[in-house]
């Protein structure tokens, strides 16, 4: 009888200890979960040692693959330098332009560095860094096109555009029929193959293409009046990360790093 009582007491004690241990483990897990939940995005990035950057990888000279297949470009250099100053590495996540915002919404990446133009609709939903590049939109057609001499001539014509870009909005404004394109290179291919009449695109991209491929049969027939500012794009509610990126950009300009990157790709300062 005494032996049975002793064994019963041991079982009771073991059960009590087990319950206490489970409660302690659950409490530790809850505390860890709360700590993660309380971390802002900048803290999480620094803790992981990686910032995830959304970019196209098909938009020269901003973000594209070189002859060896390596991701490179002006925006890629900017993103790498920002990450360096944050003390982390970059994980580039390549995404087509028309899926870029959905990817940020779904938190597939922490920021987008892809010459994203600042406009009121985007500012209502997202946060931007301070602008780091200024560019103008140009109207591009085939060399032998004599029908389109200005934006007003786009009415009823086919214009190759990424659907969600500011450039597509300009084309719609002038009555163009939009033909969906995945990016600048495809838009130019559609023009040269005469499947579309034109594209409204970035002047810096046009100049880079003519520099790399001077025989491409395209020309600029008009320049849009309004210069656009582009910046790093974030989901709202990440002030600490936005502030840290802004400081990195300011420091890059102050110490001459930004100018070196700009001159490397464009031969001039494209922040003005």
Image (cartoon, rainbow, N blue to C red):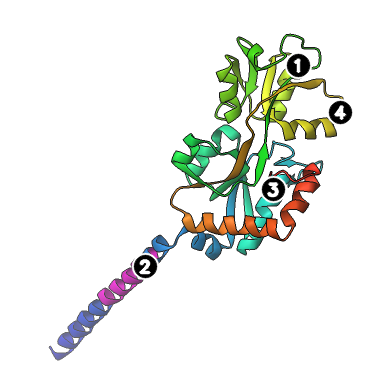
Residue 92, horizontal then vertical, whole percent: 63, 48
Q: Secondary structure at mark 3?
A: helix
How crowded pointer 4 is (Cα within 10 Å; few <14, some 14-19, many 20+) is rated as: few
Query: Which of the two labelled residues, at mark 2 and mark 1, occupies the earlier sequence position?
Result: 2
Label pair 3/4, CB-CB below 8 angstroms = no
**N-term-proximal mark, 3 vs 4:** 3
Question: What is the distance, in whole Å, between disc 2 and disc 3 at their CAs?
Answer: 38 Å
Compared across the picture, whether 144 is left or right of 186 comes to right
Q: CA distance from mark 3 to mark 4?
A: 24 Å
Residue at the image point whose x is 45% and y is 48% from the top:
236
Q: Residue furthest bottom?
A: 2
Q: Is residue 94 above or below residue 243?
A: above
Q: Quadrant of residue 164?
A: top right
Name the residue tied to disc 3. 76
Distance (Cα) linking label 2 and label 1: 60 Å
How far is the residue under mark 1 from the one under mark 3?
Answer: 30 Å
Residue 94 at least partly seen: no
Q: Nearer the viewer, residue 165 or 185?
A: 165
């Amino acid at each position: 009888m005494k032996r049975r009582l002793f064994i019963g007491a041991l079982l009771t004690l073991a059960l009590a200890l087990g319950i206490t241990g489970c409660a302690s483990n659950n409490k530790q897990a809850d505390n860890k979960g709360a700590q993660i939940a309380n971390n802002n995005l900048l803290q999480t990035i620094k803790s992981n040692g990686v910032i995830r950057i959304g970019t196209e990888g098909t938009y020269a000279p901003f973000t594209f693959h070189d002859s060896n297949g390596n991701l490179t470009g002006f925006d890629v250099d900017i993103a790498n330098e920002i990450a360096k100053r944050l003390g982390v590495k970059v994980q580039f996540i390549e995404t087509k332009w028309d899926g870029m915002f959905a990817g940020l919404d779904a938190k597939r990446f922490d920021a987008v560095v892809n010459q994203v133009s600042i406009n009121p609709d985007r500012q209502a939903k997202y946060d931007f860094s301070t602008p780091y590049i200024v560019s103008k939109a140009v109207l591009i057609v085939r060399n032998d096109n004599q029908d389109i001499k200005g934006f007003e001539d786009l009415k009823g014509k086919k214009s190759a555009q990424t659907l969600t870009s500011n450039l597509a909005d300009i084309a719609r404004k002038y009555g163009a029929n939009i033909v969906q394109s995945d990016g600048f290179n495809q838009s130019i291919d559609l023009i040269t193959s005469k499947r579309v009449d034109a594209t409204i695109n970035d002047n810096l991209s046009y100049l880079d293409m003519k520099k790399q491929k001077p025989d491409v049969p395209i020309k600029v027939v008009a320049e849009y009046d309004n210069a656009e500012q582009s910046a790093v794009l974030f989901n709202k509610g990440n002030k600490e990360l936005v502030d840290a990126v802004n400081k990195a950009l300011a420091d890059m300009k102050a110490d001459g790093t930004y100018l070196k990157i700009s001159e490397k790709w464009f031969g001039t300062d494209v922040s003005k």
